[in-house]
Each structure stands twice: as structure tokens, then as C-alpha cells.
Image (cartoon, grey):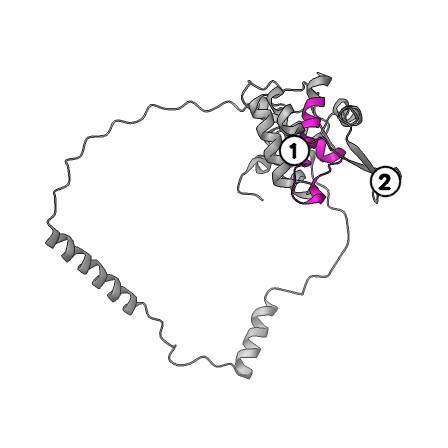
Amino acid sequence: MDPQKADLVIQYALAVAAEAEDFKDRELGPIHLIKLVYLADLAYAQENGGETFSGAPWRFHHFGPWAVEVYHRLGPAAHAIQAVERRFPSQYKEEDAFRWKAQEPGLADRLEPRLPFPVASAVRKSVRTYGSDTTGLLHYVYRTAPMLQAAPGETLDFRPAVDEPVSAPEEHEELPPLPKLSKTKIKNLKALVKRRLKEKMQTETLRPPDPAPRYDEVFEKGQEWLDSLAGAPLKEERGRLQFDDSIWKSPARRDPGIP
């Protein structure tokens, strides 16, 4: 990994966050910064054949991308730009949690020219979109291509998927030009369309059922009988659901239709 490049992305992310309107979004913690460096590497790799900007060895750790080398650069990179560090008790672990906030005016504008355009664009967009919204940022990161193609413990592959060969467009016969219509014919056609639409709406008008439905004792007993066909109601139980490890390579993880 190139520490200088990783530091530059971390510092730029903090500088962009410091410009946020909401003061809650002006400081970022380790989890935000690590994921932002990952997104910067992903954006750079998409335009450079899978080569990342920082060169960090990203792995699928626990639930998301992780590189311990990037984690060790967070503090030094933040302190190098005199970012303010705030510590507070963590509800998830024994050690204190912390956040950093850049305080130098105009720092983002000075750092941006030192970054490739895809990197700066990805970081700025992500910071402005998610701010300190950890849940939203993680949900987005977990759905990125390298994560969906890997299983826990594996090294993430930033190489773009091989595109399917594009077939040559089929040749079509040229259709003869449409005949020109006079203003009178166009007017008559519009009137015809309106009339047909009106007739269709009238034929599709809902009508009350005849005879009217009965909501009496017979109806209730019939409903109870139909419900009984489903069997006894399910009982509430507790347990642990275990999935086979092959699920990580399942095509369902990469299905864009699954939220």
C-alpha cells in the first residue's frame, strides 16, 4: 500500500465533511473513513483495469471491506492536518470511540487537485450523500461488486467483470415514409381516439354485484372453514438459522432486484 495516497484520501474526506451544513456530518469516524478509502479505490479501479489507488490489500472481514493498513493510517493522516479528535464512550466495545473533524478553511479545494478525478469525485459524492449516516454508507458499500463476488475472509477483486461480446446490430429494411396527413384528417383522428377512449371508460365502469354479498352467520362459518384448511396456526419459536457457505457465491447476491 502507498501510505501517502491513503493519507491523501483520508484527509480529503475529512476536509469535504467539514464543509457540511449539518454540524453532525462535519466529523467522521474510523468506519466512515475506511469505507470512503475503499470507495475511492473502487472508483479508481473501474477506470484502471482493477488497479486501486491506494494499493491497500482489501479483504472481506466480518461484514464489509477491511484493510488493517488503512486503519493504521487514520490517526496519523488526521493529525497531519491538525484535525480535532473527539473521544466518547462506545456502546459496542470497551475502548472509547472517536471522531475527527478538519478545521482548516479551504482544505478540500487545495487537496482535490492532488487526487485523480474518479477518486475525488467518489469521495466527495459519498461524503455529501451519507455524511455520518453509518447505516446508509454501509448498506451501499456492502452492495458493491467486489463485496458481492467474495466470501468472508477472501481478498476483494477490483477487476471489472468481463463484458459479454456485443453482437453487431441487425440490419433492418428501411420502411417507406409515412404519408402526410392533412389538418382535417389529423383533427378527425384525434376526435376518433377521444370517442373510443370515452366508450372504453363507460364499458369498464364498475357495477354493484347482483345479488349483493351476504355478510351474515353463514359467511362467517364459511370463512372459518376456509381458514381451517390451512392447518393449525404457527407457533412462535426461537432458534438459530444456519446457511451453507455456498450462499456467498450464489447468483442471488448479485441480483439487482433484491434489496
In the picture of the structure, the residue carrying the numbered disc 2 is 93
Circle 2 packing at 10 Å, graded few (<14), some (14-19), many (20+), is few
Element carrying mark 2: loop
Q: Which residues are magenta?
A: 7-33
Question: Does residue 12 belong to the magenta stretch?
Answer: yes
**Residue furthest toward the bottom?**
217
Task: Tell me the residue at 89%/39% (across/down).
Answer: 94
Find residue 16 and name its label.
Answer: 1
Q: Nearer the viewer, residue 245 or 118?
A: 118
The relative height of residue 199 versus residue 146 in the rendered view (above or below) is below
- Tell me: 207 left or right of 84: left
Circle 1 packing at 10 Å, graded few (<14), some (14-19), many (20+), is many
Distance (Cα) linking label 1 and label 2: 28 Å
Tell me residue 181's x, y (percent).
12, 47
Q: Quadrant of the N terminus?
A: top right
Q: Nearer the viewer, residue 14 or 74?
A: 14
The relative height of residue 236 versus residue 40 in the rendered view (above or below) is below
Q: Quadrant of the C terminus?
A: top right
Tell me residue 208's x, y (percent).
38, 77
